[in-house]
Image: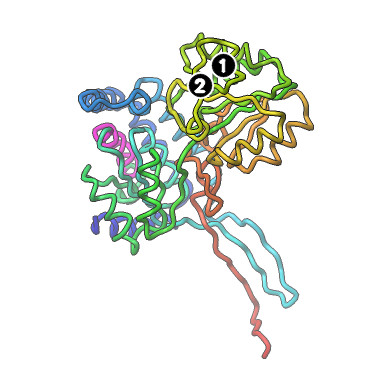
Amino acid sequence: MQGLGRAAKSAAKSLAQASTESKNSALQAAATAIREQRDQLLAANRADLEQATQRGISSSLRDRLVLNEQRIEAMARGIEEIIALADPIGSVIASWTRPNGLKIERVRVPLGVVGIIYESRPNVTADAGALCLKSGNAVILRGGSESSRSTAAIHACLVAGLRAAGLPEAAIQIVPTTDRAAVGYMLSSMTQYINVVVPRGGRSLVERVQAEARVPVIGHLDGNCHVYVDRDADVTMARDIVLNAKLRRTGVCGAAETVLFDRAGAAAAPVLKALLDAGCEVRGDETLQRLDPRIVPATEADWSTEYLDSIIAAKVVEGVDEAIAHIARYGSAHTESILTTNQATAERFLGGVDSAIVLHNASTQFADGGEFGMGAEIGISTDKFHARGPVGVEQLTSYKYVVRGSGQIRPV
């Protein structure tokens, strides 16, 4: 682990000075390698899936673990989208001149070495490696044991890209052990090497990282996301959006976990029927239970639960203000959506909900860096320091002040 840290810190110095062209060249070579090594990636993933099945992995975690031809192509395209992004390093965020003639610039710089600890999702290896490289950061990746073979195969493609571009191969490293003790060591004993840690996984992982880390952490605990269906919602639109928000992929952090209905609206019955007909379990309050015998009673715990499964909590509220209050009490400050044709109500919701992402008439499953035009993301941060929302290239930078003078001295 100490060797990984020393190599990463050395690589970070080189990357901070690397040209945009060399970084993009490495990324394009990595994307090409991912496509060319498709069969090897699929074989590695099949081995991971077989092991996961033997361990009795949940359906939601299995969905995150699976690689197929479409997801492999999506990884390669995601890297190419990162190539197309402007290089943030060296860009001037702001500049001004003082009365004494000093010219001051605030300039973007890399964070340094990023440690990323994640579970299940092998695609995080490609996304995180590419984002860190583009933003001039070295990265140490620690994937979950359930995806170790897939992670290693993807990492080999990234290293091939670095090698082709003449950049240090230690710029993107993986922890070569699945021993859980390695996580603790990263968090507590590598502060001289790692500048920031990003956890991406379940609540237990993120809580452990936040509790043990001796460096700054960018992360979120839960994706307890809400859709509020207002009295002025278009019923057909509401049905389609709620179905997508819940069921497109139930295991992602942007999946809706609670749907709130304005008591004065007419969308509850058709929306809930569509969910139930699609095989989703609905846990509703007493009012909603009267609409369909298939709706089971909700408990207090349901309002704050991230199911990551085909289950949704449903409740009637007395208008937008009660919806905002419910989200403030039970939500995780991740992603919330309002469905309404009333612009004033929409603005009240968008301004009143204090979450990282708020949407109007759109699915919560758009909570994704790629969908935001950021190429990819390392995760969705619900923190307010250092980054919030999708963590992409710009969010993996800091800044420094560059001051240019012409002989000025400060008076006594």
Residue 164 as seen in the image, left or right of residue 110? left
Mark 2 or mark 1, which is nearer the start of the sequence? Answer: 1
Residue 241 as seen in the image, left or right of residue 113? right
Q: Percent x, y for residue 27?
A: 41, 39
Residue corresponding to mark 1 = 289
In percent of the image, x 38 and y 56: which residue is there?
A: 12
Q: Percent x, y for residue 171?
A: 34, 50
Decide whether the magenta segment is chiefly helix, strand or loop.
helix
In percent of the image, x 64 and y 18: which residue is there?
A: 238
In percent of the image, x 58 and y 21: which residue is there?
A: 286
Residue 80 as seen in the image, left or right of residue 402? left
In percent of the image, x 39 and y 45: which residue is there?
A: 206
The quarter of the picture where the C terminus appears is: bottom right
Snapshot quadrant of residue 324:
top right
Considering only vertical position in the picture, is 162 above or below 286? below
Q: Percent x, y for residue 140?
A: 33, 49
Considering only vertical position in the picture, is 190 above or below 300? below
Residue 67 seen anywhere in this rendered image of the structure: no
Snapshot quadrant of residue 41:
top left
- Give the extent of the magenta segment: 147-163
Counting the numbered discs, the total is 2
Residue 199 seen anywhere in this rendered image of the structure: yes
Snapshot quadrant of residue 289:
top right
Q: Is residue 161 magenta?
A: yes
Question: What amino acid is found at the position of numbered circle 2 in the picture?
Answer: Pro
